[in-house]
């Protein structure tokens, strides 16, 4: 059964230095608040998994949280490069970052395999792609029935998966709707799961086949309204596209990035506090 | 009838849109492919089925998405499934007619690099990476590629093959065990390139009105083959331009202040 | 795009002698009307797939439609044996029936693999079970990453899958809710799909992540109100438990069975007609 | 306090229900397992999670289902997923604490036959087959089995091992690569059998009140081991009987006329 906990407590108890951690959310419902809390608590040497490392991983990588990154597409969606991600890979700043690079088909399948208790994913992938030359974990196996060669890759089974969702009830059952990404699979693939939610409601009212994550597969539920911002939460708030664009400038130089992170994350106590400061500095930028 | 003035980007988008048949099932990349696919849907191909890798199937966005997972896609879709399911049941399952991709770099055989400039282990420029492209390129029955033509993008040799087009040409796809067609057109702001029927080398088969061969050659990092019967792309018609500009205006208005 | 067709036309055009056919529906939404139509049209030598062959397969098998059956549980749920299924396996009546027997985990996975365009399923299964001795298609493969032995079985890719659903719109998009079974996977695994529906509505009103089968993966949609009876259609009608019980008597002897099938199926023109006769004979039974 | 009279089936159901801890995630077979699991849910274990192979997770039926996929299961569940997902994410994924099975035939090591009586290729009686049982028996952390005890069901040698219990005993499960416990109790209308801690042979460890050892032996097709400290099963209490009879009455009323 999920415990309803403050986010800082959940991160403190469940995410340890050196852990394998996935923060998932495909454009929608990205767990930014949780990423900030991991940075605030100074975690180090994490192996991070994420199909689409974007701003939240740029921030975590730039702050030296990650030792290794498993991913399939790293960019600022609709804007361009992730400067901190690039700086880490191109220049090893602030520390060297190992990467394990896969495709969306593979990595989403790897979460499915992890959720299914399997050690490997089986798919048709990478035919003719150089990715298979640089990732030694991409193997071929032969179908015993047809003789076809198929791709096998290791499944993903994080120590902790962190996602953001729209609603939980008081027992910690979670409801997600709209773009689901691989969140359910990432939760089921992990040993522990932290779910930040927009709100706790008296009663979930799911459609018959809705995406419900039962309380008993979740370790901690944390109420963090707006906790996906600057990404969006369908039914709650829109994507803050302006911030995605602004991030391109904020993150371009190491100094600007560090200054911003200090003021907005390290010197704030919570995501609520961060949002206040962000609103203030957004005024400065536009004025 | 006089044609309206239009930009190079506009004829690129219109030319790409025209290649989508009504009813085709199209796996859409964000940016230029998404714009062209939606233009097709709003003009000659109302029943084109747009699938985005984030999960929406049959999306009918009224404004263009800025990200691959905008709420507008899910809200207008026939249904939204998990990202994993998109790649298993829908793409790998052989349900996609057209994979519609962009590219950072492309070579003469329409192989695509979206991974690195420079050596993989010590990149000069680290690009975003593969995303869904390698499997879209392999599993979609056919692939369209849309990107602006330049020496930087159209290179003699790509540093990294993220997504195979026609490999080293000829029957290379077949030798790799691929039974799909691969790239059938590359649509740029200067013209349309299609693979030679034997060598599969990209050949300029259509040039946009007012563009010179020298311009095209100057924007290509290899000695570009030109078709014997080079066509001139039909200019965008008034309706296409109207719908495209409307779509862009609606999109700008929706994201005003962003 | 699906064509909206009368059921008899769809069966005539799409299901041929010798074809591999799956009629799916897990207790809920079993395509009985379609099964009757296949019997009426005298199909022979079908390879039938179904996780839970129940009354509709008992009828098809007893009428000599099937040459081979791939299944994982064959019984009259909550009642007992399927007498025609047993008679075919135990005594080869009315013709010999080859069986390929699998477990639910395997066969549901085999539909998933079929839907995913893969030739094989990968799972943990059959450990210590004699099923693996009698089904030569159950193989072991070794995970290249962990050395674990996993089970590989062939995927299922029928020529035609037939299912029943609640609603279609005029374009042939289909909406299903409640117990989904493996219907979606069975449709996606097949070359062609026939979907019988309770009704055609002006506009489907699916929840955001509802089970919708787009028109373009379906070959024919046939409007057959009540077409799942005696199983049920959530939101439309209940399971006819009395008929499941009655079937035990009807099917016990070859003669009674043949008489019933003649009167109810062979001598009726349609499922509507069948339902009228069935209502009449139900009166006879209870009076 | 006097105990109310009760039937052999009632004490079987009550004894089985008592073995389900509150909060346990239970993969429920239809029939006796489903009845016992719902009795547990309606008495001491309100938070037991019932998963049915047809797709419902967290079902809370107010009347007993007649089939494994009754609408009542889906209508009262936290959510309903596909049958394939039940077996992959939930069972194989290691999320199930208790697999709750019935059986046609069982042997001294709690191996189960639900496939054939007689030779596989020329069966005397063709039974329904495996269903979900082989993987429930392997992947659930622990298995409970409920069935009525008789010579016909409790046989010296089963004709076919559909679902392994403890195989040939001792560490056979471990040798097969299974890390789960397998059957921990077999609950019958006469008593409760549990595997010996070393040999894993089923041993009568609890006998229902009023049942004699001779009765139990006569209903067992092998020389049944009896525990040194044989317990007498606690009789159903008034509340258990009340709730069970209510449940059965509601079920009968709901299916009246069927």
Image (tube, coloured by chain):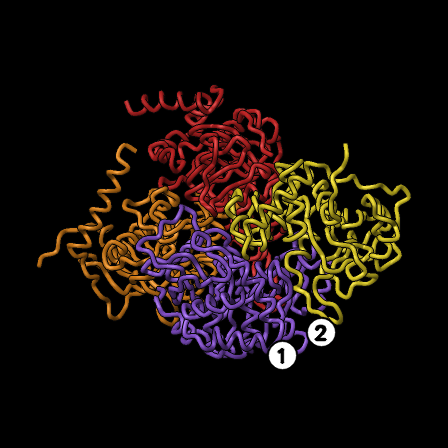
Chain colours: A red, B orange, C purple, D yellow
Question: Quadrant location of residue D218?
Answer: bottom right
Numbered tag placed on residue C93 in the rendering: 1
Relative to D161, say whether C252 is above or below. Answer: below
The answer for which chain carries disc 2 is D
At a point 77% along the width and 59% down the height, the residue shown is: D153
Could you tell me if residue B239 is visible in this image? yes
D34 displayed left or right of B89: right
Residue found at the very far left of the displayed protein: B1
At a point 40% along the width and 32% down the height, the residue shown is: A230
Q: Residue C4 at x, y = what percent?
A: 34, 66
Judging depth in this view, the residue of D257 and A179 nearest the camera is D257
Task: Give the residue pinned by disc 2.
Answer: D121
Question: Quadrant location of residue D257?
Answer: bottom right
At a point 55% along the width and 36% down the height, the residue shown is: A96
- Marks 2, 1 in one chain: no
At a point 36% along the width and 48% down the height, the residue shown is: B30
Q: Residue C211 at x, y = what percent?
A: 44, 52
Q: Which of labels 2 and 1 is toward the front? A: 1
Crowd around label 1: few <14 · some 14–19 · many ≥20 (10 Å): some
A266 displayed left or right of D2: left
Q: Residue B62 at x, y = what percent?
A: 27, 46
């Amino acid at each position: 059964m999920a415990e309803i906990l403050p986010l800082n407590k959940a991160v403190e108890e469940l995410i340890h230095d050196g852990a394998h951690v996935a923060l998932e959310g495909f454009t929608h419902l990205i767990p930014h608040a949780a990423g900030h809390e991991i940075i605030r608590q100074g975690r180090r040497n994490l192996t991070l998994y994420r199909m689409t490392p974007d701003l939240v991983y740029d921030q975590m990588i730039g702050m030296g949280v990650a030792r290794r990154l498993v991913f399939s597409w790293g960019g600022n969606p609709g804007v361009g490069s992730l400067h901190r991600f690039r700086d880490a890979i191109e220049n090893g700043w602030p520390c060297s970052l190992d990467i394990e690079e896969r495709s969306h088909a593979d990595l989403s399948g790897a979460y499915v395999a992890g959720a299914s208790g399997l050690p490997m994913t089986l798919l048709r992938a990478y035919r003719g792609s150089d990715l298979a030359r640089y990732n030694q974990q991409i193997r071929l196996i032969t179908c015993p029935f047809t003789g076809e060669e198929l791709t096998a890759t290791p499944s993903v089974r994080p120590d902790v998966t962190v996602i953001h969702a729209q609603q939980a009830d008081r027992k910690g059952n979670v409801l997600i709707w709209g773009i689901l990404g691989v969140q359910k699979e990432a939760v089921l693939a992990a040993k522990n799961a932290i779910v930040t939610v927009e709100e706790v409601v008296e009663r979930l009212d799911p459609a018959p086949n809705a995406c419900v994550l039962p309380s008993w597969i979740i370790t901690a539920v944390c109420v963090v309204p707006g906790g996906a911002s600057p990404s969006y939460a369908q039914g709650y708030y829109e994507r803050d596209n302006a911030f995605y664009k602004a991030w391109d400038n904020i993150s371009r130089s190491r100094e600007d990035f560090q200054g911003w992170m200090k003021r907005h994350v390290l010197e704030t106590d919570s995501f609520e506090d961060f949002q206040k400061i962000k609103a203030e500095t957004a005024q400065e930028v536009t004025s | 009838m006089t044609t309206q003035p239009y930009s190079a980007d506009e004829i690129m988008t219109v030319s790409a849109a025209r290649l989508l048949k009504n009813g085709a099932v199209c796996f859409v990349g964000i940016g230029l492919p998404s714009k062209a696919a939606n233009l097709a849907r709003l003009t000659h191909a109302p029943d084109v089925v747009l699938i985005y890798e984030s999960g929406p199937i049959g999306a009918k966005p009224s404004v263009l998405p800025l990200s691959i997972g905008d709420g507008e896609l899910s809200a207008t879709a026939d249904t939204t499934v998990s990202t994993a399911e998109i790649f298993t049941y829908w793409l790998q399952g052989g349900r996609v007619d057209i994979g519609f991709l962009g590219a950072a770099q492309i070579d003469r055989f329409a192989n695509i690099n979206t991974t690195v400039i420079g050596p993989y282990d010590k990149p000069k420029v680290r690009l975003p990476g593969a995303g869904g492209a390698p499997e879209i390129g392999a599993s979609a029955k056919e692939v369209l590629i849309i990107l602006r033509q330049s020496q930087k993008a159209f290179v003699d040799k790509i540093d990294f093959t993220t997504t195979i087009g026609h490999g080293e040409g000829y029957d290379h796809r077949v030798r790799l065990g691929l039974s799909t067609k691969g790239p059938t057109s590359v649509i740029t702001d200067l013209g349309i390139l299609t693979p030679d029927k034997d060598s599969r080398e990209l050949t300029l088969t259509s040039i946009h009105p007012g563009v010179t061969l020298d311009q095209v050659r100057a924007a290509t990092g290899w000695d570009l083959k030109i078709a014997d019967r080079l066509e001139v792309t039909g200019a965008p018609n008034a309706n296409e331009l109207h719908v495209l500009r409307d779509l862009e205006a609606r999109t700008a208005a929706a994201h005003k202040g962003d």
